[in-house]
Amino acid sequence: MADEYSAVKRGKLVLKGDKPKSKKRKHKKKDKSEVSKVDEDCIKHGGWWRVEKIEDLTGSISIEFGNKSYISALDNGLFTLGAPHNDNEGPSSEEIFTAFPAGENKFALKSGYGKYLGVSKDGVVTGRSDAVGPMEQWEPVWENDKTAILSALNKFISVKLNDDSVVADSVTAGENEYCNIRSNKSREIQRVVVPEEEGDLNEVEVNYVKKFQKFQDKKLRVNEDGVLDLKRAKVEGNLHETLLDRRSKMKADRYCK
C-alpha cells in the first residue's frame, strides 16, 4: 500500500525567476511561499490534506491521531489506532473510510468492510451497521485550529492509551480528543469574485443588465419576474444559466436573441 500512496500526484511550485524585480513580484513570491507551507504537511502525509470544513467531508477520508497514525478498521467491527507511518506515506487501505453527508453539519462513515461507523450506548465506536441511523451520524468540530469529532451521544472520539481502542466517551475535547480528518481528493478551486455578482440578487441582475444591454433611449429595462427564480438558482448552483434565460427575454439584449 505504501507504493500506491506514494504515487499520489502533488502540486509543484513553479518559480519564474531567481530574484523578484518589483514589489508586485515580491508579493506574489510571498503568496507562493505560504502555499508551499500548506502543501508541506500534505506531502508529508502522502498527499492527504487536512479537512477544515464540512463541505470537504465526502469521498475517501482518514482520521489521524497523534503523528501519522490513523484509525484502522478490524474485521470484528471494532477499531484501533494503526502503527505510525513514515514521511510521504499515506494511510493504509484499512485506515481509509468513505464519508457521506448526513444532515446539517453531520457526516457518516463507511469502512472498507462495507459497514457504517456508529457508537454503542457504552461509548465504543463500532462498524457493524448496514444503514445510517442517528447513532451513525458524526459532527466535526473545528476551533482554534483544532479538530474533534462528536458522536450522537454528544461525546468526543478518542483513542484509549492502554489498548489503542477507539471510543467516544469524553464530554470535553482535549489533547486526547484532537485529531486530523484528512482527504486526498482534489481540492476545491477558490471561487473568483465577479464584480457583477456583488450585492443582493436585485443588484446582481441590474449589474448584468448594465453590462449586456444597450438601448437607444438609454433607459434600463430589468426582467419583471422577481427574484424568486434567482434565489432558487443560487441555491441549486445555476445562477448564471438563470440570468441568461432572463436576459434572453429582453429583446434589446445584445448577447441574447
Image (spheres, rainbow, N blue to C red):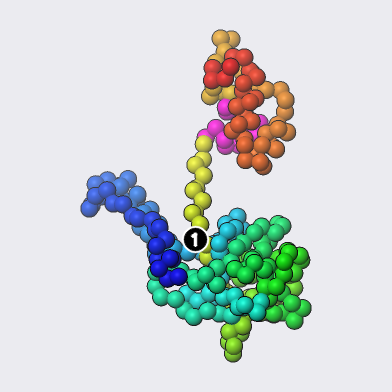
Q: Secondary structure at mark 1?
A: loop
Residue 158 coordinates in the image, percent (x, y): 62, 78
Q: Residue 57's image quarter?
A: bottom right
Residue farthest to the bottom, as pictured: 162
Residue 152 coordinates in the image, percent (x, y): 73, 70
- Residue ID at (44%, 76%): 85
Q: How many marks?
A: 1
Asked if residue 198 is among those painted magenta in the image, a careful observer would answer yes
Q: Which quadrant would the N terminus be assigned to in this image?
A: bottom left
- Residue ID at (53%, 74%): 70
Mark 1 belongs to which amino acid?
Asn
Asked if residue 132 is among those painted magenta in the image, a careful observer would answer no
Decide: few, some or many residues near mark 1? Use Cα within 10 Å; few <14, some 14-19, many ≥20: many
Q: Which residue position holds label 1? A: 184
Q: Residue 200's image quarter?
A: top right
- Residue ID at (71%, 23%): 224
Q: Is residue 198 above or below residue 51?
A: above
Residue 55 coordinates in the image, percent (x, y): 60, 55
Q: Which quadrant would the C terminus be assigned to in this image?
A: top right
- Residue ID at (43%, 65%): 4
Residue nearer the viewer, 246 or 71 = 71
Residue 222 coordinates in the image, percent (x, y): 65, 22
Q: Is residue 123 above or below residue 3?
A: below
| Left or right: 100 in relation to 83 | right
Residues drawn in magenta: 195-208
